[in-house]
Amino acid sequence: MRAMVLNQLCSLEENKTPLKLVNLPEPVPGERDILIKVSACGVCHTELDEIEGRTPPPHLPVVLGHEVVGKVEETGSKASTFKVGDRVGVAWIYSSCGTCKFCLAGNENLCRDFKATGRDADGGYAQYMMVPEDSAYRIPGVFSDAEAAPLLCAGAIGYRSLRLTGLQDGQNLGLTGFGASGHLVLKMVRHRYPNVKVFVFARSAEERAFSRDLGAVWAGDSAEESPEKLDSIIDTTPAWKPIVGALKNLEPGGRLVINAIRKEEVDKDCLLQLDYPTHLWQEKEIKSVANICRQDVSEFLTLAAEMRIQPEIQEFALEEANVALIELKTRKIRGAKVLRID
């Protein structure tokens, strides 16, 4: 099978082609696994962190990609959920132990043995991939393969982040950063909370204009002060500086939800600017998002089908994965990037 493989960690500023096109043997599914013939795979900012070593894969080489859509090609001898030909998706959660207190409570995202698709196990930048059957999801028929791909990460993690804000209709929501996840959150809010006003903070003028096109009532730079105080804010950036600005913009009792797998150390000195009465006093909260649960993916796919969400996508051939990654790195973003695997 053809696959785009990461063989070594590197800086994307120095190496514009970190992934190499190779031929690999097709995976062989275990008893409770399924083999998927991949048709589309989203390109996520987390892949930049994997390539550049901020969230490094535990072993190399590895096939990246955790927003995977395709059809079941083969099932393991004890796999019974899907049949050959079913269209399925795979998200960031590849597996968990299934027996710890977190897994038993439905919080497998916190499992100490959590394994991520495309990092701890080969993902979807390839013609085929294997996954445990309980980490695959039926894709609603209203979506094309390319439309469904970004829903599996950007959409699902956005859904979890929105749920963790505790947002109520009529309140004000802030979005810091406006990429694949942010634009889907805005679409969800417009559908579920007609009286919520959304305020967007983004460095790029193009992203700010895009957010206004989708219904944001205001869009400014991440360092700006919002015209109204915000009941909750979702931060999707890898930087610390927007955190300081977000806390300043929160209402008393407001909540900041940080939807980021890591934060860069380069600007950590900005935390010295934190002023307790300005940024944290009056019962403001900070909550992080750690991965996603299987329930998040299932619930969001149902909601997305009900809403008929149509994510903005840019498509690339599998062989163009490096191009898509460099565009993501240089913030040439409008919606989500998706690889077509023919």
Image (cartoon, rainbow, N blue to C red):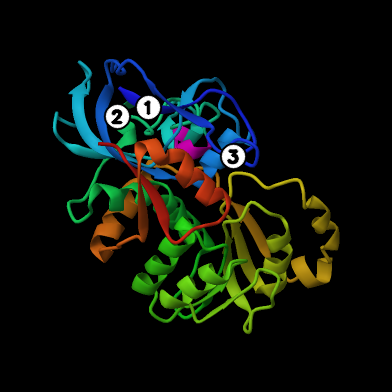
**Number of numbered labels in the structure image:** 3
User: Residue 127's mark?
Assistant: 2
Distance (Cα) linking label 3 and label 2: 23 Å
Q: Which residues are magenta?
A: 103-110
Q: Which residue is mark 3?
A: 49
Residue 150 placement, left or right of 89: right
Q: Is residue 161 visible?
A: yes
- Residue 322: give x, y in percent of width and height: 48, 39
Q: Give the label, 1 or 3, closer to the camera.
A: 1
User: Residue 271's mark?
Assistant: none
User: Above or below — where is 311 with respect to 293?
Assistant: below
Determine the residue positioned at 30% across, 63% down: 309
Q: Is residue 81 visible?
A: no
Determine the residue positioned at 42% across, 81% down: 195
* Kind of residue sitting beneath label 3: Asp
Q: Are marks 2 and 1 in contact (CB under 8 Å)?
A: yes
Q: Are marks 1 and 3 in contact (CB under 8 Å)?
A: no
Quadrant location of the C terminus?
A: top left
Q: Give the label, 3 or 2, closer to the camera.
A: 2
- Residue 298: give x, y in percent of width and height: 31, 47
Work out whether residue 332 or residue 288 is closer to the camera in this orientation and state it: 332
Q: Is 108 in the magenta?
A: yes
Work out whether residue 24 or residue 272 is closer to the camera in this orientation and state it: 24
Work out whether residue 303 or residue 120 is closer to the camera in this orientation and state it: 120
In what element is the residue under mark 2? loop
How would you rate the neighbour count of disc 2 (Cα within 10 Å): few for under 14, some for 14-19, many for 20 or more? many
Tell me which label, 3 or 2, sits earlier in the chain.
3
Which secondary structure is most common in the magenta stretch?
helix
* Kind of residue sitting beneath label 2: Gln
Tell me which label, 2 or 1, sits earlier in the chain.
1
Distance (Cα) linking label 1 and label 3: 20 Å
User: Residue 3's mark?
Assistant: 1
